[in-house]
Image: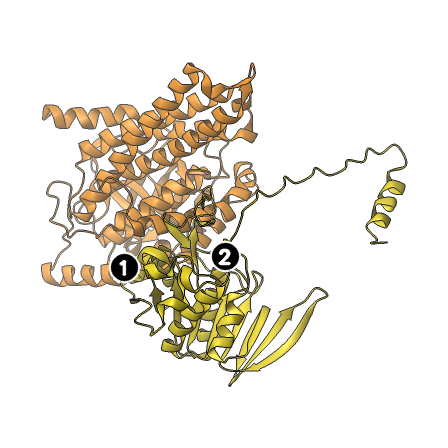
Amino acid sequence: MNVVVCVKQIPDPAAPPSLDPATNTLNRSGKLILDDSDAYGVEMALQLVDAAGGGEVTLVSMAPNGEVSGLRTALAMGAAKAILVSDDVLVGSDALGTAKVLAAAIRRAAPDLVLAATESTDGYTGTTPVQVAELLGFPSVTFAKKVEVSGSTVKVQRQTEAGFDEVESPLPAVVTVTAGVVEPRYPSFKGIMAAKSKPVETLTVADLGIDPSEVGATGARQAITSVTAAEARQSGEIVVDEGDAHERIIQFLEQLKVL
Amino acid sequence: MFEWSAEQLMVRDAVRAFVEKEVKPHVAELEHGDLLPYGIMRKLYTTFGMDQLARDRFARQLEARRRELAGAGAHQTPTDGGAPARQGDGGAAAMTLIPIIELCHYCPGIVTAMGVSIGLAAGTVLKRGTPAQMERWGLELATMEKIGAWAITEPGSGSDALGGMLASARRDGDGYLLNGSKTFITNGPYADTIVFYAKLDDGSDTPVRDRKVLTFVLDAGTPGLVQSPPFAKMGLHSSPTGELFLSDVRVGRDHLLGETEDEAGGGGRESAKDNFVQERAGVAAMALGVIEACLALSVDYARERTLWGQPIGDRQLVQLKLAKMEVARLNVANLVFRHIELSAAGKQLTLAEASAMKLYAAQTASEVAMEAVQLFGGNGYMSEFRVEQLARDAKVFQIYAGTDEIQVTHIAKALLGT
């Protein structure tokens, strides 16, 4: 079974982020790393391929400046190869533009299953995977906390607010996985050493046959018009117990309409 | 080499994540003897596939040993006298040293326990053992399935370990009777396999000091062998250290390393010296880990701690401490890089160079860690702030793997040609 995992390479969250004042978009000029939330998809894919007894995991990513650092991390975990789309015309792409690029790249890999995180850690739109599914004409299942493949069907436990739904879908399909789906492995030393010689196919928009006017800032139908600093979090109320703390807690919960 | 490569940084980041998750939360238990280090060591090995790498390497070592024996018809082991031409290791030395550095940010004791088991015990068996001995003891030590100890030091001899050794091996039929006691033995209390050094007592009147040194491999539980409980120590609490007592321990010739009394071919003095260069380079990497940790903790503290309304980092006396720590970090990192680069080029530090590197790195790590305690003031004396543990742990770098004073003699001997 062949699985494609959509992975995003993002600025290191440990470093202070900065916005480009002209476009209000995140500054991505520095070194990028594998988005932590994508490590779950990579691990899930590796396990599904193992369970199927054959096939391989292909990474698909779109990033500026031919960036491969994050891809190497996922290749070190055990993915077989990667497709990277990197092209200056993609600067300023919105979620749909990104989905068009990813869908075109995924089509080349002809996968049985596509996995993605529910949302990226830097952009948080959470819309790209379902757009990819729509463009590919695949069914999509979101928020998977457990994924199993049986024959040509994928069985998913789909996280809900109350618990989970059991969902089945024919393959090929797009499934987004939550952070709880599996525990990502550490790359082994052998895996790290092997990663640098694994194939990374770097493509441009033209290679994918996409009209450049449909992507990048030109094709974007979504623009960030202004940015406001998030409000500082209000400090909580401290209840000093003078014998009536339980009553005050009950009052508080009643105010919240929890009780 | 002036910085880590992209690949080495991936190794560092992966090990760092492991250390944060698997070591950091257990430091207190490790320090207080509530948790032995062996579970974490084995998990490190299996997580990063180091056990499989050791298995692959073992197959090659065994094959080479068999070929060597078939070709030479006798034991031919490289000695310190003529370092053989080696192939470059492709930077493999870094793969060993990076985990050492990262572990030492929190727990140098784990490195000591691991280094003795893998570097000294497994290393000696794999370098000097017969193919049968390599298979019987070497493989499981190299993969960390078994824990090893390396027993040379005795209560009456430390720096004079070989000359002053009193432990004896008397021929007894087709085997040997071993007697004596060993002390300061890392992993001694819990080791499954012990590499044990003793003087051959052949009944002649050769003075004890001049007798041949033989090396034996012993299994825990052998009748007459007692492994003491761990000592209480100044630092390095996560590495169990103990004594060994042997009274009339009878072993067959199959336990004699290399199955020969010929010192050059089997165990003996040369086998004890085999490890000096690697061991000293390893201690320098440990020192680098302690220095990096102390520097990072000190910089954070200098920024956050305020006195008289301003961060202590604004004070020049504090800045001087930080600057000296940074100088130490750069110097020791460069020494470690040099060792890695030499290995990659198929070369090796001379004993004098390794001694110089170890002497400087050990003294510097101790100074940096004590200065970190001073920078933290009262908090530095409290365990919660970690630097006191690192300072106690770093002190041993100046004592084990050859004291500072012994390093000086090795450097001077090379300089003066004596």
Q: Is the N terminus of chain B in the top left, top right, bottom left or bottom right quadrant? A: top left
Q: Is the C terminus of chain B in the top left, top right, bottom left or bottom right quadrant? A: top left
- Amino acid type of disc 2? Ala
Q: Is residue B311 above or below residue A63?
A: above
Q: Identify the residue under disc 1.
A: B57
Q: Position of residue B379 (x, y in %)?
A: 55, 23
Which numbered marker is on residue B34?
none
The image quarter in which residue A34 lies: bottom left
Q: Which is more toward the observer, A201 or B335?
A: A201
Q: Is residue B230 above or below residue B60?
A: above
Q: Chain of mark 1?
A: B
> Residue at point 46% right, 38% down?
B106
Mark 1, secondary structure of its residue: helix
Say if labels 2 and 1 share a chain. no
Q: Residue furthest bottom?
A: A151
Q: Which is more toward the observer, A234 or B397?
A: A234
Q: Residues within 10 Å of mark 1 (few under 14, many from 20)?
A: some
The image quarter in which residue A206 lies: bottom left
Q: Which chain is represented by orange in the image?
A: B
Q: Is residue B207 visible?
A: no
> Residue at point 30% right, 41% down?
B197
Mark 2, secondary structure of its residue: loop
Q: Which chain is represented by yellow in the image?
A: A
Q: Identify the residue under disc 2.
A: A223
Q: Position of residue A114 (x, y in %)?
A: 47, 73
Q: CA distance from mark 2 to mark 1?
A: 56 Å
Q: Position of residue B244 (x, y in %)?
A: 42, 40
| In this picture, residue B114 sits left or right of residue A223 | left
